[in-house]
C-alpha cells in the first residue's frame, strides 16, 4: 500500500451556502482526495476540518495553499493548510 501524502485543511468563517461544495470542487480539480471531513456550525460560524491526501496530485503544497487562500478571501473565510508531518511533529508527546 502506497504511503499517503496527508494535509490538514481548516476552514473558519460566517456560515453560508456552498462552502463545502466550493472547497471540495477545488480539491477535486487538483486530484486531491478527501480522507476525512468534519464540519459544524456554532452560533453562525462555520468550522470545518479536512484530512486530505495529495498522493497523485500534480499540484504543489504552495500552489494548493495559494488557491485555497484565494478562495477563502473571495468567500470571506480563513482557510489554512498544514502538512500532516508538521502537525505530528508539533503534537508529538515525548516519553
Image (spheres, grey):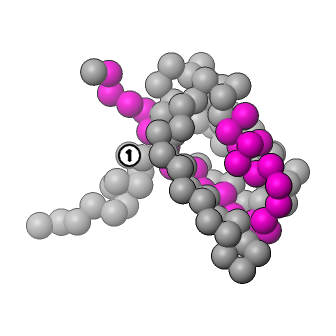
Residue at position x 54%, y 56% from top? 38
Residue at position x 23%, y 66% from top? 93
Residue at position x 34%, y 54% from top? 88
Residue 73 visible in rendering: no
Horizontal placement of 63 versus 88: left or right? right
Residue at position x 73%, y 72% from top? 45
Q: Residue furthest bottom?
A: 43
- Crowding around mark 1 (Cα neighbors within 10 Å: few <14, some 14 to 19, many 20+) is few
Q: Is residue 9 magenta-colored? A: yes
Foreground pick, 82 / 23: 23
Q: Quadrant for the C terminus, please.
A: bottom left
Residue 35 in the image: x percent, y percent?
47, 39
For the image shown, how many numbered marks are present on the structure? Answer: 1
Foreground pick, 52 / 90: 52
Q: Quadrant of residue 62?
A: top right
The boundaries of the magenta stretch are: 2-25
Horizontal placement of 40 versus 25: left or right? left
Residue 42 visible in rendering: yes
Amino acid at each position: 500500500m502506497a504511503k499517503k501524502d496527508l494535509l490538514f485543511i481548516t476552514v473558519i468563517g460566517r456560515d453560508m451556502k456552498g462552502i463545502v461544495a466550493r472547497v471540495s470542487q477545488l480539491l477535486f480539480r487538483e486530484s486531491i482526495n478527501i480522507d476525512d471531513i468534519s464540519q459544524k456550525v456554532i452560533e453562525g460560524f462555520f468550522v470545518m476540518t479536512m484530512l486530505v491526501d495529495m498522493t497523485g496530485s500534480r499540484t504543489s503544497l504552495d500552489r494548493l495553499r495559494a488557491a485555497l487562500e484565494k478562495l477563502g478571501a473571495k468567500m470571506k473565510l480563513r482557510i489554512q493548510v498544514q502538512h500532516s508531518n508538521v502537525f505530528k511533529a508539533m503534537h508529538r508527546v515525548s516519553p
